[in-house]
Image: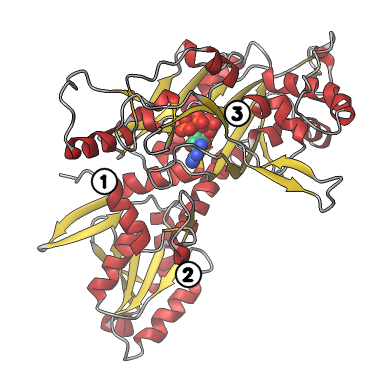
């Protein structure tokens, strides 16, 4: 029976095999920041390639962009992030830890007897890994502040103290930085908290420079930054992360059809890349969870091995109506106010919509209907790091082979960091030369790895752990009949393949 994967197994394999390291480790590490090592960067690039292939390359109705991380401050005013992208937090008066108010949990009812230190440790561990502590829905500060919060029966997830909290306060999630060398014209800017706004801001540019016609989408992959209150769980929730987002624009009235289309397409993408169906599900947002402008929203959730095995968001898919384009039309109308206010966002309100907003600068002219309107948008928004973690978790396996534990990553070929490893059985009798020649030929087509050090069994195990689908070994027989053994990672079966058939054989098996 397959073993239940724990996050610790993944963290330790990632470190041991150079997938993912703690950032700045030589200085003691920087919390919640991670670096992708030699195997990790290949995995992550493969996840991004797989997104691009399915969303751009294989479709005729989506184009790509790569926007800058720093954007005009008015972008964040129009999108609502400048005013609303915050969490409501309270600080524990005992240990000074800040926790999101919506993550605080009630103390257990049976608590008339004070918990023992061991029980506190266990309780706080459970609280920290509970779905509530992991799940983030960023709230509108105004709405959250308007609500009364009684924290007297709540427990601190860090030290277990009950009811000892400061008044709730907003905590802004966007990172600030300064732009410009001169004091006079230096401006406060924000690192983007999502990639989507770059797409909306370029909607007109794409319309004017390409032949796209509705329905069509624009996608980009890139870094986003959020000063999250709670991080934890390895690369699941970090402050710097990569997103892949698609804004699919369509005629109002066709939005429900496209919403269903993208739900199917995105679910299938994960399963085609190896995630087991039983570990993946949709979770519809409840009506009170939906943003006021969204018509529908669903999370694609994966059963991550966090805490007791929780379902967690991998990707959100939303019907955002025409909200974003209309907001940016209001933003364009507000620009003068911003200049007049000394280019300061605080204290300015977005201008009202023009009466003829349907034919505004971000509207679309429908040639067939001879009509202008603001398109609706369906937004699949995925996390590249979070997907990479899900692919690692799902691919991880341990099995007993002749009394020894074999760790392996059963990646589908498209995601495997290395596709083929090439070994000479021994480092003599001309085997390394033949193996090197094969390696030099094959690396033109796939990511290959050459290794001649150590016992052959150890070399196989190392590649199993890296998720390499095939290992080729040059042995004594190769020198006689020019065949090599091709070992399959999953079954460990070996077949002999003639060197002149190798490329075709591997292409077929790898489906690349
Ligand atoms: P969550 O509820 O998990 O915080 P969210 O609903 O705020 O996510 P979105 O704004 O919808 O997330 O972002 C889209 C995707 O980006 C998420 O589904 C997730 O995969 C990824 N993502 C968001 N925040 C983070 C983060 N702090 N670290 C890693 N990935 C993230």
| Nearer mark to the viewer, of 3 and 1 | 3
What residue do we see at 86% from left, 45% from top? 185
Using the rendered view, name the quadrant where residue 205 is placed: top right
Residue at 73% of width from left, 41% of height from top?
189
Q: What residue is shown with label 3?
A: 85
- The numbered mark, 3 or 1, whose residue comes first in the sequence reads 1
Residue furthest top in the image:
355
Residue at 36% across, 60% down = 15
Side of 485 relative to 116 (left or right): right
- Point out residue 385 in the picture as x, y percentages from the top left corner: 47, 46
Asked if the residue at label 2 sits under 8 Å from ligand 1, the reply is no
Q: Is residue 36 visible?
A: yes
| Secondary structure found at label 3 | loop
**Mark 3 or mark 2, which has the lower sequence index?**
3
Which of 256 and 109 lies nearest the eye of the viewer?
A: 109
**With respect to residue 327, does 428 lie above or below?**
below
The circle drawn on residue 192 is none
């Amino acid at each position: 029976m397959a073993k239940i994967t724990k996050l610790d197994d993944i963290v330790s394999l990632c470190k041991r095999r150079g997938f993912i390291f703690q950032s700045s480790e030589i200085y003691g590490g920087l919390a919640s920041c991670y670096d992708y090592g030699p195997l990790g960067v290949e995995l992550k690039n493969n996840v991004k390639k797989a997104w691009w292939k399915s969303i751009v390359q294989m479709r005729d109705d989506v184009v790509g962009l790569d926007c800058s991380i720093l954007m005009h401050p008015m972008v964040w005013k129009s999108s609502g992030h400048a005013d609303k992208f915050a969490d409501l937090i309270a600080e524990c008066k005992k240990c000074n830890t800040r926790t999101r108010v919506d993550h605080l949990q009630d103390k257990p009812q049976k608590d008339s007897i004070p918990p023992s230190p061991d029980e506190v440790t266990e309780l706080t561990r459970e609280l920290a890994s509970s779905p509530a502590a992991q799940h983030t829905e960023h709230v509108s500060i105004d709405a959250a502040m308007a609500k009364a919060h009684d924290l007297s029966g709540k427990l601190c997830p860090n030290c277990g103290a009950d009811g000892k909290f400061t008044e709730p306060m907003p905590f802004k999630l966007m990172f600030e930085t300064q732009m410009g060398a001169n004091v006079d014209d230096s401006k406060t800017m924000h690192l983007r908290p999502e990639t989507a706004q770059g797409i909306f801001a370029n909607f007109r540019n794409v319309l004017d420079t390409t032949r796209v016609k509705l329905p069509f989408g624009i996608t980009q992959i890139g870094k986003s930054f959020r000063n999250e209150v709670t991080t934890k769980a390895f690369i699941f929730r970090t402050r710097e992360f990569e997103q892949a987002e698609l804004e699919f624009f369509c005629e109002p009235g066709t939005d429900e059809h496209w919403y269903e289309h993208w739900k199917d397409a995105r679910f299938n993408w994960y399963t085609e890349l190896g995630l087991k169906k039983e570990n993946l599900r949709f979770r519809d947002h409840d009506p009170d969870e939906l943003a006021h402008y969204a018509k529908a929203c669903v999370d694609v959730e994966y059963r991550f091995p966090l805490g007791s095995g929780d379902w967690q968001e991998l990707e959100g898919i939303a019907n955002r109506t025409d909200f974003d384009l209309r907001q940016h039309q209001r933003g364009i109308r507000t620009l003068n106010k911003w200049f007049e206010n000394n280019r300061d966002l605080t204290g300015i309100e977005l201008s009202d919509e023009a009466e003829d907003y349907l034919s505004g600068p971000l509207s679309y002219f429908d040639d067939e209907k001879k009509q202008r309107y603001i398109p609706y948008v369906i937004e699949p928004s995925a996390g590249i790091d979070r997907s990479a973690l899900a692919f690692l978790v799902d691919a991880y396996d341990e099995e007993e082979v002749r009394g020894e534990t074999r760790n392996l990553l059963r990646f589908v070929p498209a995601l495997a960091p290395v596709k083929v490893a090439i070994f000479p059985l021994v480092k003599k009798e001309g085997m390394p030369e033949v193996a090197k020649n094969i390696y030099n030929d094959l690396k033109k087509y796939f990511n290959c790895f050459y290794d001649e050090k150590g016992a052959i069994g150890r070399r196989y195990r190392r590649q199993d752990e890296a998720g390499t689908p095939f290992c080729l070994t040059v042995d004594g027989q190769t020198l006689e009949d020019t065949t090599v053994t091709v070992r399959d990672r999953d079954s460990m079966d070996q077949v002999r393949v003639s060197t002149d058939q190798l490329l075709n054989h591997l292409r077929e098996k790898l489906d690349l």
